[in-house]
Amino acid sequence: MTGHPGTARPLDAAAFAPPSLLRFAGAALAMACVVLASNILVQYPINDWLTWGALSYPVAFLVSDLINRSHGPVPARRVAWVGFAVAVAASLALAPARIAIASGTAFIVSQCLDISIFHRLRQGTWWRAPLLATVLAAALDTAVFWGIAFAGSGDPWITWALGDLGVKLSVGVLLLLPFRLLTWRSAAQAARPQR
């Protein structure tokens, strides 16, 4: 299916099977846990270039990309919104309000960008959609989060932001392996005859 010669159009949302309630709830819970953990861990610097939160956050992109690949952009956006609501509510109780607000804002705009880019590129080479979506969304997330959470604080937030982005990009590349393995597994399970 093409719009212009040589370009593929993304699949319509109706082309995807909806996730089971268990899969949806599991993905939303995973998303909320990743964001909450990252909001707590970002308060603990490893050095002048990095906080512990940089190590956990990229998993959020893996969760949305897996749901997007299997079930399409509509359920992926729903998972992001539910994860967002749970994580922001919990973060307001467990992290400073400025971090919770910065995280919530950065999270939802970057997830929407990730889901949109992934969906537009889904029909290309298996690694292109998750890699490009993660790279662009990670850059947006980093700029929004660090600009709101730490600008003007006196902390070395610019170097933390650069370190954070470097880790997000590195972990994003490393997460291509589990992405590929999990999508192969899902495809193999879907291809099995039902009894």
Image (spheres, rainbow, N blue to C red):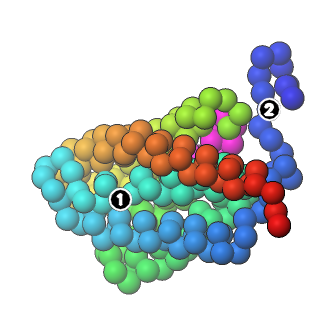
Part of the protein shown in magenta? 113-121
Quarter the C terminus occupies: bottom right
Considering only vertical position in the picture, is 169 above or below 103?
A: above
Inter-mark Cα distance, 1 to 2: 33 Å
Query: x, y percentage for residue 116?
Result: 65, 45
| Residue at mark 1 | 56
**In the rendered view, does 28 fall on the left or right side of 123?**
left
Q: Amino acid at mark 1?
A: Ser
Name the residue carrying label 2. 9
Quadrant of residue 55 within the rendered picture:
bottom left
Per the rendering, the mark at residue 158 is: none
Q: Amino acid at mark 2?
A: Arg
Where is residue 44? Give x, y as percent.
20, 65
Which residue is at a point 30% across and 71% down the rendered structure image?
40
Q: Nearer the viewer, residue 9 or 106?
A: 9
Q: Residue furthest bottom?
A: 93
Q: Which element is circle 1 on? A: helix
